[in-house]
Amino acid sequence: MRYHYIFSAILIFTAYFLLYYFQVQSSSATNGLIYSFSKIYQSHRHTVIILAKTPSVRVLKHLNALVHVGVNAFVMCDEQPSKYINATNRILYVHNESLAEYGLTRNLVWDRAFVWLYNQTSLDYVWLMEEDVTWSNIHHIVDFFDIYTNNHADLLSRNIIYRNQGTLGWMWWPKVFLKILPEDKWLASLNMISRVSRRLINAHQYYVRKLFSERKKLNLTQFDNNYYHQEFLIPTVGHMFNLTMLIYDHSKMDVFFLALTENDIRESLAFGKRIFHPVKHDSPLLINATAIRNRKK
């Protein structure tokens, strides 16, 4: 009889211990973002960098959703992330001193992303995504990436604009002309979601160094910082190296100049749009953007 009570006590203790353990785990999952891969899309290893000012809750939810569906995702921050979150290898930051080595003094998140990518030689292709991009369901953005898995273009962009009489009004064309980037090679691209290749990253590094050298010349009294604007520099250096640049299929994407309102999102969803930019708020209509659930249309 004594052994019976001892055995019962052990079972009760074990049950309480397991209950406590799972409660702790549940609490941790609620209060922190847990980075673990689901079985969905594990065969596809897209690399994505979300470009953000800070690692906000909204940004981290998008990061977590991407990681959980098998995307090798990161956030590059424009401000020191340690002020906002504990260190993790998925939250990236490049110090201003490293940017200064390339003459990049405006300290923009796009500059930080490319300087970081200069040293990531194992990455052949990387998707770059601004923080105000979102989607109606996580699977829609992964399906979009999947379309281009076997496409070897060096730049995939929402739009590519050539310099001609009809586009002279674009605000980011440089006003000062440099021989190292002649005007007949100038391009612009719309990059809220874009993919760059290792070849394009190397071309970017090469010309950032060339631009820095030009700036240091004693006879150069004026320099136009528009040469560093990402929508100009990325496609233009690609053009200089005769790289392949394509406009991707954006039929399920809605891109506005101003932030989308709830009415904009509602109308876009009705027209079959699934990826949106720019969305600056947590829309109830996009509640599934960061939910890990079954596929939805």
Image (cartoon, rainbow, N blue to C red):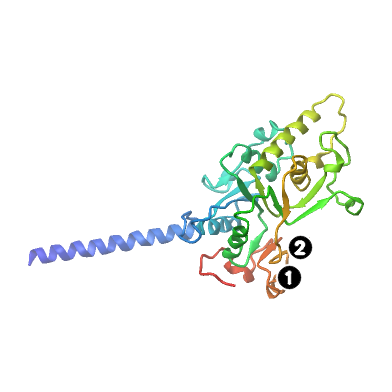
Extreme right residue here? 165
- Residue of label 1: 264
Q: Give the amino acid type for the residue marked by disc 2 in the picture.
A: Phe
Q: Residue at x 64, y 53 (%)?
A: 151
Q: Residue at x 67, y 38 (%)?
A: 202
Q: Residue at x 81, y 42 (%)?
A: 226
Look at the image and tell me whether residue 112 can be seen.
no
Looking at the rendered image, the quarter that the C terminus falls into is bottom right
Q: Does label 2 or label 1 sit earlier along the sequence?
A: 2
Looking at the rendered image, the quarter that the N terminus falls into is bottom left
Q: Give the amino acid type for the residue marked by disc 1 in the picture.
A: Asp
- Residue of label 2: 256
Instruction: Where is residue 58? Give x, y as percent.
Output: 60, 58
Extreme bottom residue here? 270
For disc 2, the neighbor class at 10 Å (few under 14, some 14 to 19, many from 20) is few
- Disc 1 is placed on an element classified as helix
Is 211 situated above or below 154? above
Q: Report if the CB atoms under discs 2 and 1 are less than 8 Å apart.
A: yes
Query: Camera-side residue: 285 or 186?
Result: 186
